[in-house]
Amino acid sequence: MAFAFRRLLSVSTLIFFASLAVVAQTETVYVTRTGTKYHRASCRSLAKSSIPISLSEAAGRYGPCSICRPPLPGASSTPAATASERS
């Protein structure tokens, strides 16, 4: 029984990390023509230019904006579940 649980946990972990990789490839963030940071669509730094780019590509070439705090690759873009939601 313990072996089956560990195997299930291992498979679940692999699926979780694979889904994070897919999110990073498909999630869109924005960069500016001359900037060095990537942003959320609502960031005030995008007032003059806004170029859509995938999160995975942006993270390889730019740093995250400290104002809008866009998602990081490999991190979930949705808020963490609260203790009551996990129960």
Image: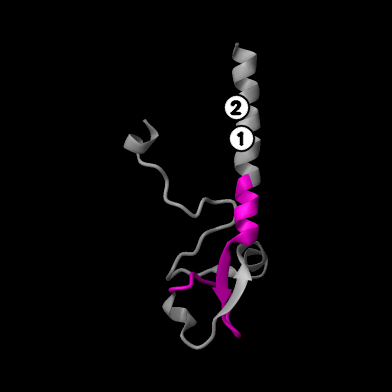
Q: Are marks 2 and 1 in contact (CB under 8 Å)?
A: yes
Residue name at image x 67 percent, y 66 percent: 57
Horizontally, is 49 left or right of 15 in the view? left
The quadrant in which the N terminus is found is top right
Amino acid marked by disc 1:
Thr
* Dot 2 crowding, Cα within 10 Å, few <14, some 14–19, many 20+: few
From the top left corner, tell me how far across and down residue 27 is, in percent. 58, 62
Image vertical order of residue 12 relative to residue 71, above or below? above
What amino acid is found at the position of numbered circle 2 in the picture?
Leu
Magenta residues, start to end? 19-42
Along the line of sight, which residue is nearer the eye, 63 or 33? Answer: 33
Q: Which residue corresponds to the image point at 55% horizontal and 69% vertical from the top-left?
A: 29
Residue found 46% across the figure and 52% down from its top: 78
Q: Residue 18 occupies which quadrant of the picture?
A: top right
Q: Is residue 46 above or below residue 21?
A: below
Along the horizontal axis of the image, is 61 left or right of 80? right
Q: Position of residue 38 (x, y in %)?
A: 55, 71
Q: Residue 84 at x, y = what percent?
A: 32, 35
In the image, is residue 72 above or below residue 39?
above
Here the colouring is: one colour
- Residue that mark 1 sits on: 13
Query: Which residue lies under the disc numbered 2?
Result: 9
The secondary structure type at the circle numbered 1 is: helix
